[in-house]
Image (cartoon, helix red, strand yellow):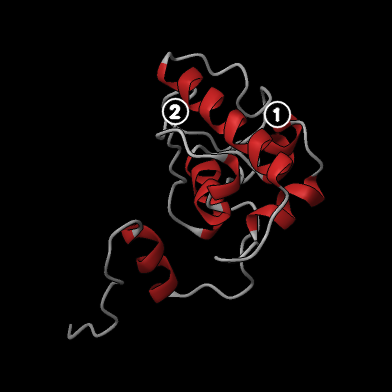
Amino acid sequence: MTDAVPDSQRSPKGDHNRRIAMGFDIDRFAELAGVSREALHEYEVTGPDHPFDVEIAHRVGAALDRLEASMRRGDVAERQPSGESAAAFAAGITTAAAGDPNPVRPAGADAMRDSPEDWDEADQAADESFPASDPPANNRFD
């Protein structure tokens, strides 16, 4: 849980990143926060120093805090509905530990929910290296 921040001073992009880090897709999180998908999207794409709906910020912040506390306790009932994969996962792909608060998708286009049409060795190497800070080299000398 983050330090208490007044709703009017929340960081929409920071809240977006917290939601993504917890593995919630926009539809499921909007439902849990009690806001519409459109309102959540509008809030999350608000740029720095731009006004946003303070009531939406309040609901989003409260939901994030509640869900993070729930995950720390190991209660994952509010996560993705049973049988659903995390947002970026292909159907049927799950993490090794059920309820993992930080799911990591296996590498490869086959494990992606929305796999790209073009996929080459460099794409595979980049996907396998995630979340490394540097992309893989594409200069093999063998």
Q: Nearer the viewer, residue 11 or 109?
A: 11
Q: Which mark is residue 32?
A: 1
Which residue is found at the position 56% from the left and 54% from the top?
A: 110
Find numbered disc 1 in the image and state the secondary structure of the residue it sits on.
Answer: helix
Density class for disc 1 (Cα within 10 Å; few <14, some 14-19, many ≥20) is some
Which residue is found at the position 43% from the left and 36% from the top?
A: 102
Q: Nearer the viewer, residue 111 or 57?
A: 57
Residue indicated by mark 2: 100
Q: Residue 74, located in which quarter of the rendered image?
A: top left
Find numbered disc 2 in the image and state the secondary structure of the residue it sits on.
Answer: loop
Quadrant in which the C terminus is drawn: bottom left
Where does residue 124 sit, x and y in percent of width and height? 41, 66
- Callout 2 amino acid: Asp
1 vs 2, front mark: 1
Quadrant in which the N terminus is drawn: top left
Q: In the picture provided, is 107 more to the left or to the right than 89?
A: left
State whether residue 54 is above or below residue 63. below
Where does residue 61 sit, x and y in percent of width and height? 58, 36
State whether residue 70 is above or below residue 141. above
